Image (cartoon, rainbow, N blue to C red):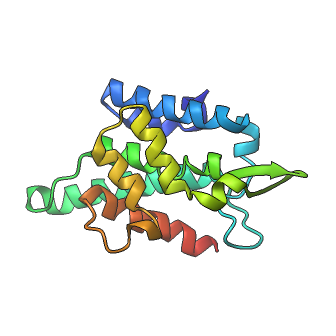
Amino acid sequence: MITELLPEIDEIKDEKLRQKVIDVWEEAMEFRGWTPEVLKSIPFTLLAENVKVTFIDHVRAVCKICIAVDKVLEEVHGSKRTPVNRDYLIAGALLADVGKLLEYEIVNGKPIKSDYGKKLRHPFSGVGLAFKHGLPPEVMHVIATHSKEGEGEKRSPESIIFHHADFIDFELVK
């Protein structure tokens, strides 16, 4: 079900890492009983009005942007640039917002920030889930530093790419 929802998971070459990403998504969906249909219908952010881009579309778009950026940089700069671990980049891109499944809840048919979410934003709960499932610290770094919580931190190459890809989609949509 997760690979149908997020086919970009199959871009992760390391089978163990791929399975851990799936496991995180399964646990996050189970937390509030999220279904693929609901995740395909709720907005990806509650920070703007009338957001038409869904949560799943945002996750997929940002992941695809990350892959495209990495491919272009590799093609143009080759070995002259800082190396990027594409598996970590993809895993981080797919997990950066998974904590929103704990942060949000549906009340009267509308997504709202839950009491849990008012205390812990999605980068924190995302890292917690990733840690629980044994994801590498490099992936947790992408999750932890992708949003305002990462300001002032030294970002890895994977985190830099994801951060900018995420804000491209966010800024254009909001």
Q: Say which of 136 and 124 sits in front.
A: 124
At x 30%, y 68%, the residue is 153
Q: Position of residue 131 (x, y in %)?
A: 39, 39
Horizontal relation, residue 87 to residue 5: left or right = left
At x 13%, y 57%, the residue is 78
Q: Say which of 64 and 94 sits in front.
A: 94
**75 in relation to 137, above or below:** below
Horizontal relation, residue 5 to residue 146: left or right = right
Residue 34 shows in this picture: no
Q: Position of residue 48 (x, y in %)?
A: 69, 73
* Residue lying furthest left: 80
**140 in relation to 168, above or below:** above
Horizontal relation, residue 97 to residue 101: left or right = left
Q: On the rendered image, what quadrant is the N terminus found in?
A: top right
At x 34%, y 46%, the residue is 139
Question: Which quadrant of the view contains residue 150?
Answer: bottom left
At x 28%, y 47%, the residue is 138
Residue 134 shows in this picture: yes
Q: Position of residue 7 (x, y in %)?
A: 52, 36
Q: Position of residue 29 (x, y in %)?
A: 64, 36
Question: Which quadrant of the view contains residue 173?
Answer: bottom right
